[in-house]
Image (tube, coloured by chain):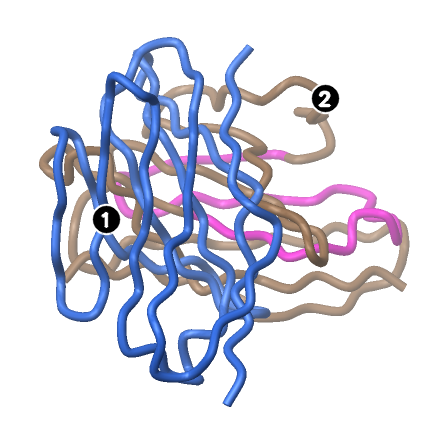
Amino acid sequence: GAVVSQHPSWVICKSGTSVKIECRSLDFQATTMFWYRQFPKQSLMLMATSNEGSKATYEQGVEKDKFLINHASLTLSTLTVTSAHPEDSSFYICSAVWESSYNEQFFGPGTRLTVL
Amino acid sequence: GQNIDQPTEMTATEGAIVQINCTYQTSGFNGLFWYQQHAGEAPTFLSYNVLDGLEEKGRFSSFLSRSKGYSYLLLKELQMKDSASYLCAVTDSNYQLIWGAGTKLIIKP
């Protein structure tokens, strides 16, 4: 149980285009979802915390107009990287929490974004 | 500020035992997690400690001392597949997860 999927697994796009990444909790209702970014050989960096039906809370330094998060249901959150640039190339990982999981975060497999 | 410290890199031999330490200073404490992350993959859950003491799960054990702000992950009978980064993370008083930078563990035959 507690499976989280992400789609796509990897994506290559041209600079200036937008990319949408989906995060789904497959067998549980996620009260909260998190979006992380990880650059090579670096640790996870929390970008934003997302609760269903409300606006996401962004970490300091993360542009909310560039990284649009929509958490429309208890099983789906999306991250849209708008007007992507090469410096946005990274590994994007989502995670989800459900009420009885003592705050354990269940991670999706990640999405590798390459912006040309 | 909130801070989690763990060694950047460790090397161990196949079949041996290795201990990865983690110290933390956070605003409140609601549990400590250890995650394993292979290169190019997302983290996977290893253990959770909220009370002092040792939690054993197969070849992996995790220890917590809240008074010392200290935890360790103990890996026994090391296998080559254990080569990965090990991430220590603490949930603070706001239930926000604070991540360490991770310890890259290299296993040599």
Residue position marked by numbered label 1 in the rendering = B62
Residue A116 at what x, y percent from top left? 90, 64
Label 1 CA crowd tier, 10 Å (few <14, some 14–19, many 20+): many
Residues at marks 2 and 1, common chain? no
For the point 78% across and 64% down, which residue is it?
A114
The chain letter under disc 1 is: B
Q: Along the line of sight, which residue is nearer the eye, A49 or B98?
A: B98
Would residue A76 be counted in the magenta stretch? yes
Which amino acid, by three-letter code, is at mark 2? Gly
What is the distance, in whole Å, between disc 2 and disc 1 at their CAs?
Answer: 34 Å
Would residue A52 be counted in the magenta stretch? no
Farthest residue to the bottom: give it. Answer: B109
A83 with respect to A11 (left or right) = right
Output the letter for the chain in blue: B
Label 2 CA crowd tier, 10 Å (few <14, some 14–19, many 20+): few
In which quarter of the view is residue A31 placed?
top left
State the SS at label 1.
Answer: strand
Q: Along the line of sight, which residue is nearer the eye, B88 or A33?
A: B88
For the point 75% across and 42% down, which residue is it?
A82
Image vertical order of residue B49 relative to residue B12, above or below: above
Query: What span is in magenta?
Result: A68-94
Output the letter for the chain in brown: A
Residue A107 at what x, y percent from top left? 37, 54
The chain letter under disc 2 is: A
B22 with respect to A27 (left or right) = right
Residue A25 at what x, y percent from top left? 28, 53
Q: Along the line of sight, which residue is nearer the eye, A34 or A76?
A: A34
Which amino acid, by three-letter code, is at mark 1? Ser
For the point 42% across and 38% down, which residue is it?
B22
Q: How many marks?
A: 2
Residue position marked by numbered label 2 in the rendering = A61
- Which labelled disc corresponds to residue A89? none
